[in-house]
Image (cartoon, helix red, strand yellow):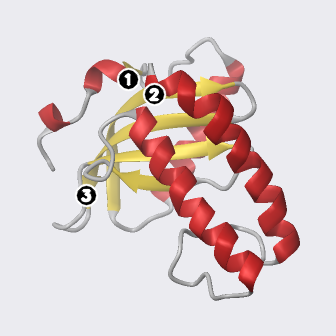
Amino acid sequence: MDNPAKLDLASVIRLPPVDVSTGDADLDSARTEARQYLQFYNWVVSIKGEYFGYGADGIIYIFLFEIEPGRPEVNQWTWVIVGDLPPTYIPADDARTPFEALDGYIGALEDWVEAAREGKSVAKLIPVNVDATPANAEMLASRLKFLDERILPELKT
């Protein structure tokens, strides 16, 4: 899905160049975290464009990045979700809008929670930066419930 027309770019706001503040300290901090998270991966040669999809102060931020991929199978459009929860990326061929990105994120983390609750391996699931214990699963499950019930409906409209 290298064609940006397949994305709903009307549902995101283009961010200013990286050396220019948005005027919102929390958004700038989340943007920096998202950039650093994405640049960790060796399949990202560079970031060509940045868009803001959604933010709930201190809880969650959803960004869309246009990247120069380092491998041919990597999509040039990638969502990054950061906040008071495990950061992740979602290829834009799996999600066209911030709603779809968050919905996919919640679903992937629910799989992790279920596996952690049951003591199963999480090795092939979305990476989460805590041990896969029942206690950690319950903490994450409560955050996911909040996202599903309070944040996701805001994005659907």
Give the answer, above or below, for where 18 lies relative to 79.
above
The percent position of residue 127, horizontal first and vertical second, equals: 58, 70
Amino acid under label 3?
Answer: Pro
Q: How crowded is mark 2: few (under 14 residues within 10 Å), some or many (20 or more)?
A: many
Q: Determine the secondary structure under disc 2.
A: strand
Residue at left offset 46%, top offset 51% = 104
Q: How many labels, in total?
A: 3
Instruction: Note whether residue 38 is visible.
Output: no
**What's the mark number on residue 53?**
2
In the rendered image, the quadrant that contains the C terminus is: top left
Amino acid under label 1?
Answer: Val
Amino acid under label 2?
Answer: Gly
- The residue identified by callout 1 is 12
The percent position of residue 5, horizontal first and vertical second, equals: 13, 32
Give the answer, above or below, for where 122 lies relative to 75.
below
Q: Check contact, mark 1 vs mark 2: CB within 8 A.
A: yes
Q: How crowded is mark 3: few (under 14 residues within 10 Å), some or many (20 or more)?
A: some
Residue at left offset 61%, top offset 44% = 82
- The residue identified by callout 3 is 69
Locate residue 58 relative to residue 67 in the image: left or right. Answer: right
